Image (cartoon, rainbow, N blue to C red):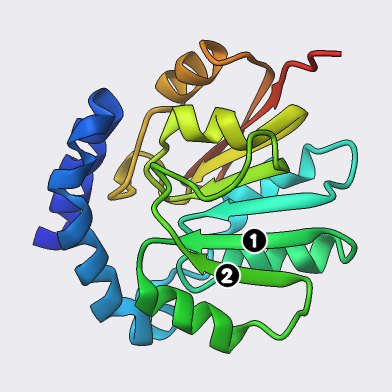
Amino acid sequence: MTAGQWFARAATVVVVRSPRLWRLFRGRLSRSFDRLAPEWDTTRASPSRLDAIGAALDGLAESPRSVLDLGTGTGSVARLVAGRWSDAEVTGVDMSAGMVAEARRLTTSGSVRYEVADSSALPFPDGAFDLVALNNMIPFFDEIARVTAPGGHVAIAYSRGPRTPIWVPLERVQKELAAREFTHFANFSVGEGVSLLARKRDQS
């Protein structure tokens, strides 16, 4: 891995353990992704980067109405979701203004919108989304649980498995989500990529 990728890995390990330390990494990571944004889809993104998240989305029995793509980058997952479920309202969020600008440039669907926001403190009400998706993204579990509607789903994927710079073992992901009222876990493996789909307990 490059120095930047090692920094992303270190940030992931520390922040998953102690989310309050995110402030130590946020600025440098945001600036790094701003620099990479113009070339991300042409030189940085692997053609197979959506395979694992796609497998998790295949596990959904019903079409979501509102979807949040956390760490949307240039919007590839948001566009994938919009292509699958044309009636869904899709919101992509990223802390990098450069990435969001690229996502807006690349997306033509009127059902997709993008916002610059910090995934550790999201500007959305509780239970706002039927589906929350993360692809190669640091998971802030408290916020994920807060914005997922009761009965809604979370899909988390790492496109290169343990070789993904931003990587959390799925066993840890499941443990953290289970502590926040998620159940019905399903794991998927596609090539070297892995993903997980979980359902939040319905409170009715």
Whether 80 is drawn above or below 51: the answer is below
Farthest left residue in view: 3
Residue at (53% x, 35% y) in the render = 144
Query: At which x and y percent is residue 52?
Result: 58, 48
Q: Which mark is residue 114?
A: 2
Choose between 36 and 90: the one closer to the eye.
90
The answer to which quarter of the image holds residue 28 is bottom left
Query: At which x and y percent is residue 151?
Result: 79, 25
Disc 2, SS:
strand
Residue at (83% x, 46% y) in the render = 64
Residue beneath label 1, please?
91
Query: At which x and y percent is residue 106?
Result: 58, 85
Q: Which mark is residue 138?
A: none
Q: Residues within 10 Å of mark 1 (few under 14, many from 20)?
A: many
Image quarter of the C terminus: top right
147 relative to 73 in the view: left or right: right
Choose between 157 and 87: the one closer to the eye.
87
Residue at (57% x, 70% y) in the render = 114
Residue flagged by tag 2: what amino acid is it? Answer: Tyr
142 relative to 127 in the view: left or right: left
Whether 82 is drawn above or below 60: the answer is below
Query: At which x and y percent is residue 105?
Result: 55, 89
